Image: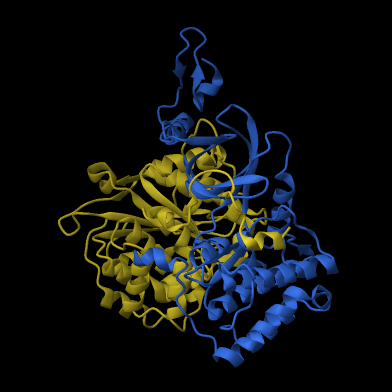
């Protein structure tokens, strides 16, 4: 998969008539599309080709439960061309996008949907809009995010990794917790394969992290409060707390740019976004959301913090200390 | 062969080999091995501190309080993240427990503004004991790194002996008052609001309040004390190395008068709250400097020049 060339103009034209459409009209599936049904899935392949000699696999795993429907719609009506444009501005060559949809395997009809890696606007858009926005979720406080990690670890094959030892990217959107383990009965029911034991979520994340940079994007600060702590235990600074779901694509593109070294720091992120016509308030919000991750990548970040040499308290207390008892 | 061999690996009772009848069986052990590989990457990195299963590489000392030393550290392993390690000086006891519980309570607040303000308060990650170099166990509190912060107002003062510009002092005090309004409004008081406990974010003109070991449920007196201490902190950063702590002639009169009254009249502060003082400060700043506008703040101007 991944043949053909990307045209930003063609992509924009495709989306031009969609602004007035409702989510139900854009996402017309009323059940899992047969080609996104993971049952019997062997592998989704991201391959190099003559047109794309340096394929860069990027996976968007979109939470399609009731509370998270805004992001797929924004992607389909407005943001996906902007994401591709930002990647181009960062000189990221040959991106190949795969869309997945995730829900709750304890209650939903289609809790896992898997597209294909694609390079052209038409095919990216096709898989995105073939996603079934079930808007379910079981009210358990958890969704089946762990199945995404399992699928990527077990059922994707990346030339970027096998030929160049370059990991792909997973951007998973969500506002709930993962279940503690990949349940073997769910793998059997959804993928049709036999798993000998349940797999703790920490282990399935470790397996997926061998070939992907894993990121969990929380859509706003209010929703970060119910899931951030657990996700940080699992993914550390790769949990990105956004201020608005509107920032999803800018955040994802900036992460790729920062990680690949195309953007040196957050100033470069801001400048690139501004040059692409992104509104100043969204630039600021994106930069704020990326601060923890960018700090990790920046070799000078720790130096810029005011570290104190030596041990113990200063020999002579400053004058103002007596005021604070 | 046991029947379970149809769907999982079983150990053969004769040769002790792991066997299965299902040629397409997915082995969970392969995922476990991935986790072990990931964890092994953290081995051999020194110096490290272990807290339960978690390992941290200490990057430097951030400071020290009356009961603990504070370090910047990198959590190693799968969930790599920058954290702050607060290690108790006392080898016995549980001196960090109160702070852990207060921070958890503050982070659990669900009221208007909590999504914003909870980011300006320390986020507790874990608590446990670490082994010191001499083999003794010390209690340690792990906090999420306050990203974007440069250092404390005490550090700013040390590097700005002539004091900071009054316009910077205005935004610093406003951020403190806004945070205090949230904290007081939800029934807590800090109790030790000194320049050591105010971290500055130069880029966003933000302030984070740390050092919550003396925090307690608020009373009119404790709220007033926080307000008084916030004003003294700002006076200190305005005065820099001036041991009189004077407001100074460069501070506009209206702002200076407000600072002086809040810092010296605790009884009056009992009748005020942080929001009211913030509004008064905004008004005074507007009268002195005009509408708010962003000014770049360099906490270490002399260091930058060298």
Q: Is residue A183 placed above or below A50 in the rendered structure?
A: above
Left or right of A310? Residue A259 is left
Q: Is residue A89 placed above or below B81 in the rendered structure?
A: below
Residue at the image point whose x is 31% and y is 63% from the top: A263
Instruction: State the image coordinates of residue A287 (x, y, percent, origin top left).
Output: 44, 68
The blue-coloured chain is labelled B
State whether residue A105 appears in this view. Answer: no
Residue at the image point whose x is 73% and y is 39% from the top: B94
Instruction: Identify the image quadrant of residue B128.
Output: top right
Residue at the image point whose x is 43% and y is 39% from the top: A207
Instruction: State the image coordinates of residue A127 (x, y, percent, origin top left).
Output: 38, 63
| Front residue (pair B187, A41) | B187
Left or right of B300? Residue A253 is left
Instruction: Identify the image quadrant of residue B37.
Output: top left
State whether residue A61 appears in this view. Answer: yes
Left or right of A251? Residue B226 is right
The yellow-coloured chain is labelled A
């Amino acid at each position: 998969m991944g043949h053909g060339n990307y045209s930003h103009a063609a992509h924009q034209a495709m989306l031009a008539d969609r602004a007035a459409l409702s989510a139900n009209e854009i996402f017309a599936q009323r059940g899992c599309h047969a080609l996104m049904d993971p049952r019997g899935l062997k592998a989704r392949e991201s391959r190099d080709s003559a047109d794309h000699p340096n394929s860069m696999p990027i996976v968007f795993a979109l939470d399609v439960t009731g509370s998270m429907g805004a992001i797929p719609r924004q992607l389909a009506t407005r943001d996906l061309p902007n994401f591709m444009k930002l990647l181009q501005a960062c000189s990221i060559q040959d991106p190949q996008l795969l869309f997945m949809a995730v829900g709750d395997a304890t209650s939903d009809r289609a809790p896992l949907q898997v597209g294909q890696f694609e390079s052209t606007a038409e095919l990216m858009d096709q898989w995105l809009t073939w996603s079934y926005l079930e808007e379910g979720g079981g009210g358990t406080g958890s969704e089946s995010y762990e199945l995404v990690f399992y699928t990527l670890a077990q059922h994707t094959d990346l030339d970027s990794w096998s030929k160049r030892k370059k990991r792909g990217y997973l951007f998973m959107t969500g506002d709930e917790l993962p279940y503690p383990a990949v349940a073997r009965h769910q793998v059997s029911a959804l993928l049709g394969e036999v798993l000998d034991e349940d797999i703790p979520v920490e282990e399935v994340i470790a397996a997926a992290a061998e070939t992907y940079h894993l990121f969990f994007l929380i859509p706003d600060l209010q929703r970060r409060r119910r899931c951030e702590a657990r996700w940080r235990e699992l993914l550390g600074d790769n949990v990105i707390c956004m201020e608005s779901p509107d920032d999803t694509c800018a955040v994802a593109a900036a992460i790729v740019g920062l990680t690949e070294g195309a953007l040196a720091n957050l100033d470069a992120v801001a400048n690139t976004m501004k040059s692409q016509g992104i509104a100043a308030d969204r630039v600021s919000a994106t930069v704020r959301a990326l601060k923890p991750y960018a700090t990790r990548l920046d070799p000078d970040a720790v130096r810029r913090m005011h570290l104190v040499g030596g041990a113990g308290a200063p020999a002579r207390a400053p004058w103002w200390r007596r005021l604070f008892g | 062969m046991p029947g379970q061999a149809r769907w999982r690996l079983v150990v053969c009772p004769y040769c002790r080999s792991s066997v299965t009848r299902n040629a397409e069986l997915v082995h969970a052990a392969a995922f476990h091995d991935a986790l072990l590989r990931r964890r092994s990457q953290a081995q051999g990195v020194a110096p490290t501190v272990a807290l339960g299963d978690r390992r941290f590489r200490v990057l430097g000392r951030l400071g020290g309080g009356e009961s603990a030393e504070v370090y910047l550290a990198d959590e190693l392993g799968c969930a790599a993240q920058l954290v702050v390690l607060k290690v108790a000086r006392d080898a016995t006891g549980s001196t960090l427990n109160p702070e852990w519980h207060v921070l958890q309570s503050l982070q659990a607040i669900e009221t208007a503004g909590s999504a914003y303000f909870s980011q300006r308060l320390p986020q507790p990650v874990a608590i446990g004991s670490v082994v010191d170099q001499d083999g003794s166990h010390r209690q340690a509190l792990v906090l999420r790194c306050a990203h974007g912060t440069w250092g404390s107002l005490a550090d700013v003062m040390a590097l700005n002996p002539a004091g900071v510009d009054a316009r910077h002092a205005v935004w610093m005090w406003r951020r403190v008052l806004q945070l205090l309004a949230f904290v007081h409004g939800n029934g807590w008081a800090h109790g030790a609001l000194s320049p050591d406990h105010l971290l500055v974010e130069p880029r966003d003109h933000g302030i984070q309040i740390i050092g919550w070991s003396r925090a307690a449920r608020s009373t009119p007196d404790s709220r007033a004390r926080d307000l008084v201490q916030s004003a003294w902190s700002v006076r200190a950063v305005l005065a820099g190395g001036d041991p009189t702590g004077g407001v100074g002639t460069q501070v506009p009169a209206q702002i200076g008068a407000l600072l002086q009254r809040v810092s010296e009249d605790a009884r009056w502060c009992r009748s005020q709250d942080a929001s009211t003082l913030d509004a008064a400060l905004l008004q005074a700043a507007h009268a002195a400097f005009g509408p708010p506008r962003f000014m770049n703040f360099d906490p270490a101007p002399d260091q930058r020049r060298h």
